[in-house]
Image (spheres, rainbow, N blue to C red):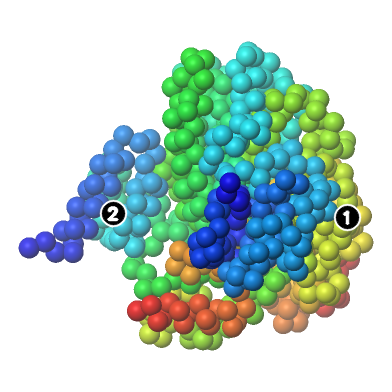
Amino acid sequence: MTTEQDLAQASLQAILQTHQNQPGALLPILHDVQDALGFIPDWAVADIAKALNQSRAEVHGVITFYHHFRTTPPAQHTLQICQAEACQARGSRELTAHAEQVLGCSLHGQSADQRIGLEPVYCLGLCSTGPNIQLNDKMVSRVDAAKLDRLLASVKEAQ
Amino acid sequence: MSIRLFVPRDSAALALGADDTAAALAAEAQRRGVDIELVRNGSRGLFWLEPLAEVQTARGRVAYGPVEADDVAELFDALIQGAEHPLGHGLTEEIPYLKNQERLTFARVGITDPLSLADYQAHEGFAGLKRALSMDSAAIVQEVLDSGLRGRGGAAFPTGIKWRTVAQAEAAQKYVVCNADEGDSGTYSDRMVMEDDPFMLIEGMTIAGIAVGATQGYIYVRSEYPHSFDVLNQAIRLAEDAGFLGENILASGKRFQLEVRKAAGAYVCGEETAMLESIEGKRGVVRAKPPLPALSGLFGQPTVINNVISLASVPVILARGAAFYANYGMGRSKGTLPFQLAGNLKYGGLVEKAFGLTLRELLQNFGGGSASGRPIRAVQVGGPLGAYLPESQFDTPLDYEAFAALGAVVGHGGIVAFDDTVDMAEQARYAMEFCAIESCGKCTPCRIGSTRGVEVIQRIQKDEKRPQQIGLLRDLCDTMLHGSLCAMGGMTPYPVLSALNHFPEDFGGAGE
Ligand SMILES: Cc1cc2nc3c(=O)[nH]c(=O)nc-3n(C[C@H](O)[C@H](O)[C@H](O)COP(=O)(O)O)c2cc1C
Ligand code: SF4
Ligand code: FES
Ligand code: FES
């Protein structure tokens, strides 16, 4: 019987294979692993280190340096709200406060039902039409409290 | 004959519902039995009008916007005839915001289908590359030198000088690295080039490779730009298949290969040496200079590192000649810069103009004043490490030297406007906090100083021993300015001190 772990292990091996001869392959590998598994599990670090002939500490150091990589599973949905200046100038602080209130958590936290993770993001490159958010893979501009509530309701309904 | 309609595929248009608009147009056309061809073009950069739908008419393209999916049924009749409508703006090219620009680098953006090689070539695409292939390396470098092009990523270093250094270096392998980390808030011109005219960047990098003798290029794209990453990869494949890139470029015997690398959400990796570390698979810690990356860069080899806009400006320089480009601009700021109007402005968007117009002209004539209708109180130019300018400085011309004289920077051309509800002490606190979050940790003034800076400003905000704390803040800024290895720590004082000096009332009135 194949367990979930076996499947994950197989996809990790395939990823390592793909990047075998690529110079400076660590970031591409970490991206692929996170895209496939949602995060970079501890057990994968040893295999990645071995494939690249590096120490686990080195690989771990790289993972923790970059904000994008995570070592724990994400919530079912991720809401990122842009915190950077151009969105501040258009009301992102108020929008963030609203999100924290309706989700019952602060930035870097998860909603009480643990279904939505709330994260900061520093610019999505949509700076003329903020406040901007990203909900899972979708970026949305000109988001006010009412629009955010609608978007959150739509992902909650989805499952 | 089918009617040609255009709905952009640029991220900014997508975030405002362009895909829904496109789907609604296709459905409406089918329902009515109207034969349409729907082109997904780039964005014109007039973001308050996105999603901007256009129709091709005998007179030219006619614009409607913002067109949401719900508007489509009612708009459709007018749209397909290019007729008048409350959402209509007449001929796109005649919209003053667009007509009053000098689009050299952005000449094709919004007009073409970003992934159509035929469109690209029909609009002067690859003319620069073809000319470069007929020249020797030194002549290409000279052309870039003569154009006066300076780095658009922030530091404004002459691009031709950098290229000459790499061209003259002896090495078996050299690299061209494009800095597409575009982390500055208020900027998106790199993103637009990558999504809306990717062949231009590919052409510019290929010319750079030929000029300096590099056969491998990397484009380091921030992870917040997934569309850019996808479009570039598709464009590279198309260019290779058509012989514009790869083993034997246009049968010249010259070789240049490109790989796109995804960053991982660290602002400091936009600093060129941190970026090299990141591409090599390491933590994005800044390297001490020397050695210059031009001599010992990626994997220790001579490397040209340029911003997206610097490289994207090269094709037109080669195609039209250095003098054509250098005729735009003022003083030592030659050519044009795609300014990005962002934040609290009524008409936010991309404005490519020759250097030399004033900040006020950008804010008023293009930006239309604040979006909120309140007075504009402060404008941050050049990203999170750029100074805040008060109203009294709005008549400064956009010119590298004029801004430097104010202790400000033009940087990557991001213009972020704030209205009079802004709290400048809070903006200063944020600047320190951003530095604390993003510091690579290599040097103490930046790593520790920024965290201390946040605490000190918080005390000022709470009115705890305010005069002493302001003195402390100034000392701290001084240490960061002079003791930091790179501009992350070295320029964070720009927004902080400009806020304190120009808006002392927000700090309890104890400014200079
Ligand atoms: C903290 C920091 C972040 C930077 N971010 C970027 C960036 O996102 N894009 C960029 O082109 N240059 C950035 N730079 C400037 C680069 O170090 C470098 O000057 C530039 O890529 C050189 O290209 P250019 O000469 O074409 O401007 C940054 C510098 C610092 C100190
Ligand atoms: S100034 Fe900051 S970001 Fe730059 S090298 Fe020093 S610690 Fe790193
Ligand atoms: S854990 Fe990365 S932003 Fe919160
Ligand atoms: S500052 Fe929010 S998208 Fe750029």
Specify the quadrant of the image occupied by residue B290. Answer: top right
| Relative side of B179 to B104, left or right | left
> Under tag 1, what secondary structure?
helix
Residue type, numbered disc 1: Glu
The picture quadrant where one finds residue B418 is bottom right
Image x and y of residue B307, in percent: 63, 40
* Residue A157, image quadrant: bottom left
Q: Is residue A100 visible?
A: no
Residue B381 pos. (x, y %):
76, 55
Counting from the top left corner in percent of width and height, residue B193 is at 62, 44
> Mark 2 = which residue?
A45
> The disc numbered 2 marks a residue on which chain?
A
User: Along the horizontal axis of the image, is B310 left or right of B268?
Assistant: right
| Point 70% across, 71% down: residue | A90
- Does B67 sit above or below residue B316? below
Q: Is residue B193 left or right of residue A64?
A: right
Q: Please name the residue that numbered disc 1 is placed on.
A: B361
Location of residue B300 with respect to B287 vertically, above or below: above
Q: Inspect this view and state whether residue B140 appears.
A: yes
- As helix, strand or loop, the secondary structure at mark 2 comes to helix
Pointer 2: residues within 10 angstroms few (<14), some, or many (20+)? many
Q: Is residue B289 left or right of residue B341?
A: left
User: Is B512 located above or below residue B294 in the figure?
Assistant: below
Q: Is mark 2 within 8 Å of ligand 3?
A: no
Q: Nearer the viewer, residue B346 or B508?
A: B346
Q: What kind of residue is marked 2?
A: Val
Q: Residue at x 72, y 82 (%)?
A: B462
Residue A91, image x and y in percent? 68, 75
Nearer the observer: mark 2 or 1; the answer is 1
Count of all numbered marks drawn on residues in the image: 2
